[in-house]
Amino acid sequence: MEQPGSEACHGTSSPDTPALPLAVQAYLEHVRVQKRLAERTCVLYAKDLARLCGMARAAGQEPLALQPAHIRRFVAQMHSAGRNPRGIALILSVWRSFFRWAAQQSLVPFNPVEGVRAPKAPKPLPKALGVDDAVRLAAFRGAGDDPWIEARDAAITELLYSCGLRVSELVGLDLAPDGHVRQQGRGWIDMEAADAHVLGKGGKRRAVPVGSDALQALRRWLAVRDAGLTGAAAQAARQEPALFVGRRGERLGAQSVWARLRQRGQQAGLATGVHPHVLRHSFASHMLQSSGELRAVQELLGHASISTTQIYTRLDFQHLAQAYESAHPRARRKK
């Protein structure tokens, strides 16, 4: 008994849809029987190949006579019609598989889709908190929470937002610098100079200023780091050079930082999910909005290329455009 939807794999059509060419029907039978693709996948293959046949018919061509120029034109048409690059890439993948099979069957001399690629998807803008939300998160103090955990998480939040550190750089910070720390490729906080010395990507060290609020949060944390632990945990913490430790006295891991920030953001009532890179993006965006110094932000973030930092100019422009549209009386869109 046929499964629902299996008719799409056999090439039958509705009264409003022309029947698929025999070669396409044979290919769909091949993927259903020989390759044993899932029924849903067969349906999607049939849909994408029906699209190919329709576009070929509109161009006055038979599907098996299509050339690379036709395929590129079809890609341009789909893109201009609003289909996203990922969707086009999936469609091209089906077409490419069909023509590869057709070439194996000697139905076409070559695969016209082989060298055709989907348009590049635009790089998504980094997610950053608004200034008010970032300040609200940094100033948040959890009522009823373990004071030791609260002091540590507050220092982590302040330090990430103050310095724009990567989470790997944060968990790699030690209490004090020594030869072993440098040899292991870790960083430290210079409380007197108010600097964070970190080892970034590519083994490059950099020093980042630490704000006064972050320094205060660090002092509160250092005052309880060892005193808040007992027994074996306290002994482990005294032997552990890490700036941030967990309840067992061991160096805090990146996953723990992600989990604590996510919970902290929820407790603070923020709509945007919070994780270490959100605070790094927020640091960069807010620094750029205030100073306009792209090179300085590049140095603070430890980016090897200015092009990596330039994405924040797009984020800044988006912020300005939204402010303009909401505030300027001649910019408001009519509903």
Image (spheres, rainbow, N blue to C red):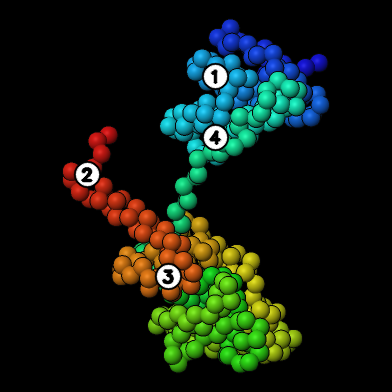
Left or right for 69, reference 245: left
Q: As shown in the figure, which amino acid type bears the numbered disc 4?
A: Ile
Q: Could you tell me which residue is drawn at 50 percent across and 44 percent down?
A: 120
Q: Disc 3 designates what residue?
A: 298
As drawn, 173 above or below 49 = below
Q: As shown in the figure, which amino acid type bears the numbered disc 3?
A: Gln
Residue 267 in view in this figure: no
SS type, badge 4: helix
* Crowd around label 3: few <14 · some 14–19 · many ≥20 (10 Å): some
SS type, badge 1: helix
Q: Disc 1 designates what residue?
A: 56
Task: Evaluate if marks 4 and 2 touch, with contact meaning CB atoms under 8 Å apart.
Answer: no
Mark 2 or mark 3, whichever is nearer to me = 3
Q: As shown in the figure, which amino acid type bears the numbered disc 2?
A: Ala
Left or right for 129, reference 253: left
Task: Evaluate if marks 1 and 3 touch, with contact meaning CB atoms under 8 Å apart.
Answer: no
Using the numbered discs, state the Cα–Cα distance from disc 4 to disc 2 in whole angstroms: 34 Å
SS type, badge 2: loop
Using the numbered discs, state the Cα–Cα distance from disc 4 to disc 1 in whole angstroms: 16 Å
Mark 4 or mark 2, whichever is nearer to me = 4
Q: Quadrant of the N terminus?
A: top right
Going from N to C along the chain, the mark reached first, 2 or 1, is 1
Left or right for 52, reference 32: left
SS type, badge 3: helix
Q: Disc 2 designates what residue?
A: 331
Going from N to C along the chain, the mark reached first, 1 or 3, is 1
Image x and y of residue 294, in percent = 36, 68
Labelled disc at residue 88: 4
Q: Residue furthest top?
A: 15
Mark 2 or mark 1, whichever is nearer to me = 1
